[in-house]
Image (spheres, rainbow, N blue to C red):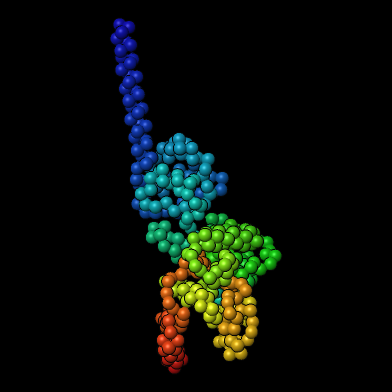
Amino acid sequence: MYKSVASNGLTILIVVLLAAAWVVNWGKNQFVAEGPLSEAICLQVKSGASMKSVSRDLEERGAISSGQIFRMGADYSERTSQLKAGSFLVPAGASMDEIIDTVTVGGRNTCGAELNFRVGVLKAEVVIRELDPATNTFTEVAKFEPGVDETPAEYGAALEDADLRYRVTLAEGATSWQLVNSLKAADFLTGEIAEVPAEGSLAPNSYEVRKGSDRAALVAQMEEAQRQRLAEAWANRVDGLPLETPEEALILASIVEKETGVAEERRQVASVFINRLNQGMKLQTDPTVIYGITNGEGALGRGLRQSELRGATPYNTYVIDALPPGPIANPGLASIEAALNPDDTPYIFFVADGTGGHAFAVTLEDHNANVAKWRQIEAERAN
């Protein structure tokens, strides 16, 4: 009888263990399997929230099949304590494992409303937009130029949203003065900027910030990013360039930035200036003359006068024999790379071609013909 009881007990134990193994395996499969969500959603995780409250929200919205398995998976993978506050895009069919990655390992704030303070070449503007998770497209809620346009009611309402994302974007070719002057109107930031950073020292990019972020800290972040960009590009430069220092490369990159807005042309434009420097020719570029007049403090707003083109100033490249003494704007990474890795061309001239790009030439005769075509286009547009 003892053997019978022992045998039955062992059988029951085996069955229990097999059942437990099956349950564990089933739970694991549920954890990594495609989820039931048929349409993407924006999941908001409040500050101080727990995995339990997050799992309850996900269950109610049909994003997961089991809150218990979700929490057990988070505990087992040691990610429960890594939960972040923010607004997160949960795509259709996301598994529990992928959702946990999104709210722990992934970056914060990937959906919801966003305020972007854009500092451009001519003006600054505030754009408020909201992501539609179902289509993964943004809808513009409001756009205005601070200090010029009337502040829309949507702006004040957006600032009351605790989950609003904030971003400051510096456009390629904007000057350091433009950034500092514009940031004064960014009332969601705090602190003062003691002085205008050196021209060219800021990396054009889009920077995520928090409400109450310090303006000077943001500028320091931009400066560090530009230092890293320039150092890496300088280390990877091609041989034989007539540029002796990273600073000279930054100066040339800023000229390339201001001369063309066509990405595909940057290396060609850079090649023209490199060829001119190699041949001892003057650079003869209008943007440097303009910077010498405005100091980067706003647009000139008119054409250059002949007296200004003849005037002997440090930035007048129609008069000086080399690069100007400093950058004339904050160049983006593409222009820095173009200056340090230009196309290999024979070009030493270029002029606008009427399409937004430029016509390049090797000889003065061909260049004059291109100039004549451009003058004709200008005349036709004026009529």
Q: Does any portion of residue 80 appear in the rendered image?
A: yes
The residue at 34%/45% (across/down) is 34
The residue at 59%/72% (across/down) is 327
In depth, the one of 163 and 353 nearer the eye is: 353
Q: Is residue 119 left or right of residue 70?
A: right
Identify the image quadrant of residue 42.
bottom left
Give above or below for 6 relative to 254.
above
Instruction: Identify the residue at the far top of this view.
Output: 1
Q: In which quarter of the image is the C terminus?
A: bottom left
Instruction: Identify the residue at the far right of this view.
Output: 194
Count of marks, rendered view: 0
Q: Does any portion of residue 334 appear in the rendered image?
A: no
Give above or below for 254 relative to 158.
below
The residue at 42%/60% (across/down) is 132
Q: Is residue 74 left or right of residue 20?
A: right
In depth, the one of 241 and 199 nearer the eye is: 241
Residue 169 x, y percent position in the rendering = 54, 65
In depth, the one of 81 and 68 nearer the eye is: 81
Q: In which quarter of the image is the N terminus?
A: top left
Residue 268 x, y percent position in the rendering = 44, 74
In depth, the one of 7 and 263 nearer the eye is: 263
Give above or below for 260 relative to 239.
below
The residue at 41%/62% (across/down) is 137
Residue 64 x, y percent position in the rendering = 39, 44
